Amino acid sequence: MSAEQPSPSAGARERAVRQGPAQARVFFALWPDPGVQAALAQHGRDLQCRVGGKLTRQESIHLTLTFLGDIALHRLDEVRAVGTRAAFEPFAFTVDTAGCWGHNGVAWVGPRATPEPLLSLVGSLEAALLDTGFRVEERPYAAHVTVVRKARCRPVDLTLAPVAWRVDDFVLMRSDLNAEGSRYTVIGRWPEANRKPA
C-alpha cells in the first residue's frame, strides 16, 4: 500500500478560503490641508472631553465622499476612471456643527447645511460607480468628519467656532488596517494638476 498524503489542517483550509483575490479597501474623500486638519482636531479634543472615546489622528482627518470597501486590486483602474469622469469644480464650505451618533459611537463635525457642490460631486461619483458595476451606500449622504470613535454619546452643544474649508481637489484613498488603526495612502487625486509629486 502506498502511503497517504497528509491532509491539510483545518486552519490551512480556512486560510485558503479566506484569501481569494488580492484586495484593497478604498474610498473617495476630501482631504483638508494641515491648517484645517488642526482646527478640526481641536474640535475633536473638545468633543472628547464631553463624550470620551478615541480621537482620530490629526493627519487622518478627512471627509468621506463615497466608501467602496474591499475591492479586487485588478479593478483599481476602473475606480480611478470614475474619479477622472466625476464632475468637479472647486468650492468652499464651513464646518460649523457637531454631533454624536449613539448607534456607532462616532462623534463628528460637519457643515450645518451640505453645500450643493459637495452633493453634486457625491452624486456624480455614485452614478459613475453604479455604471461601472460597483455598489454604493443606499442611505442619504450625510456630510461629516469623524473626530472621535468609541464615544459615549449624549447630547452635546452643537455650537462650534466655524472652520472654513476650501476644496480644490478630491482623492481616492487606500486604507490598510494595523494594530494602531487605519493607515491611509493617496492612490488618486483629481484634478490631476493638483497631484502632489511622489
Image (cartoon, rainbow, N blue to C red):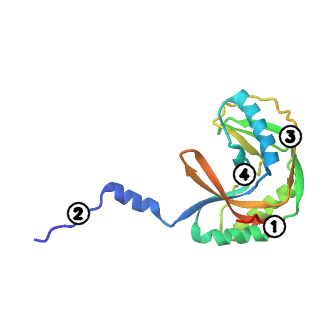
Which residue occupies the foreground of this view, 197 or 83?
197
The CA span between labels 1 and 2 is 56 Å
Type of amino acid at the residue the image marks with label 1 = Pro
Type of amino acid at the residue the image marks with label 2 = Pro
User: Closer to the N terminus: mark 3 or mark 2?
Assistant: 2
Residue hosting label 3: 96
Q: Could you say where residue 63 lies in the image, as x and y percent from the top left?
A: 75, 50
Q: Are marks 1 and 2 in contact (CB under 8 Å)?
A: no
Residue 193 sits in quarter = bottom right
Type of amino acid at the residue the image marks with label 3 = Asp
Quadrant that contains the C terminus: bottom right
Q: Could you say where residue 179 lies in the image, as x and y percent from the top left?
A: 53, 45
Residue hosting label 2: 6
The CA span between labels 1 and 4 is 27 Å
Residue hosting label 1: 191
Q: Secondary structure at mark 1?
A: loop
